[in-house]
């Protein structure tokens, strides 16, 4: 009976190590997924604001209204970026719930 005990303990240790590895892999993939969402949100906001500023500068040069249109399109780009982020987060919540 004593010879079975070490084998049982080894089997238990192997099972525990396998569970730890599986849990670690799952946590790492979840962290990477969340970091990807965060990076995507940040990039979308920066791009939307940048495009707004560039469009505003372009129209300011055409109509000689410097910096009024740039400021207007800056805020418009910011609003568009926030709108895109809200859409993404809503779809993400629906995916996680469903």
Image (cartoon, helix red, strand yellow):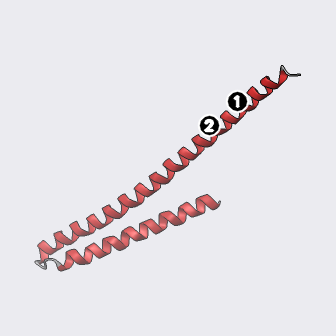
For the N terminus, the image quarter is top right
Q: Is residue 53 left or right of residue 9?
A: left
Closer to the camera, 65 or 2? Answer: 2
Closer to the camera, 22 or 93? Answer: 22
Q: Which residue is mark 2?
A: 21
x then y, percent, for residue 37: 46, 56
Query: Does dot 1 land on a helix, a strand or a loop?
Result: helix
x then y, percent, for residue 23: 63, 42
Q: Is residue 25 left or right of residue 43?
A: right
Q: Residues within 10 Å of mark 1 (few under 14, many from 20)?
A: few
Q: Which mark is residue 14?
A: 1
Cα distance in 3D space between marks 2 and 1:
11 Å
- Residue found farthest to the right: 1
Residue sitting at x 44%, y 66% = 85
Q: Is residue 63 left or right of residue 81?
A: left
Q: Is residue 40 left or right of residue 4?
A: left
x then y, percent, for residue 86: 47, 68
Residue sitting at x 38%, y 60% = 42
Q: Is residue 83 above or below residue 37?
A: below
Image quadrant assignment for residue 92: bottom right
Mark 2 or 1, nearer chain start: 1
Residue sitting at x 70%, y 36% = 16
């Amino acid at each position: 009976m004593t010879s079975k005990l070490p084998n049982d303990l080894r089997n238990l240790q192997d099972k525990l190590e396998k569970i730890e590895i599986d849990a670690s892999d799952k946590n790492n993939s979840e962290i990477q997924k969340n970091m990807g969402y965060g990076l995507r949100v940040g990039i979308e906001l920066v791009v939307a604001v940048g495009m707004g500023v560039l469009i505003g500068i372009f129209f300011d040069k055409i109509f000689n209204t410097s910096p009024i249109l740039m400021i207007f399109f800056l805020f418009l780009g910011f609003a568009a970026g926030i709108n895109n982020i809200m859409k993404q987060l809503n779809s993400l919540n629906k995916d996680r719930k469903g």
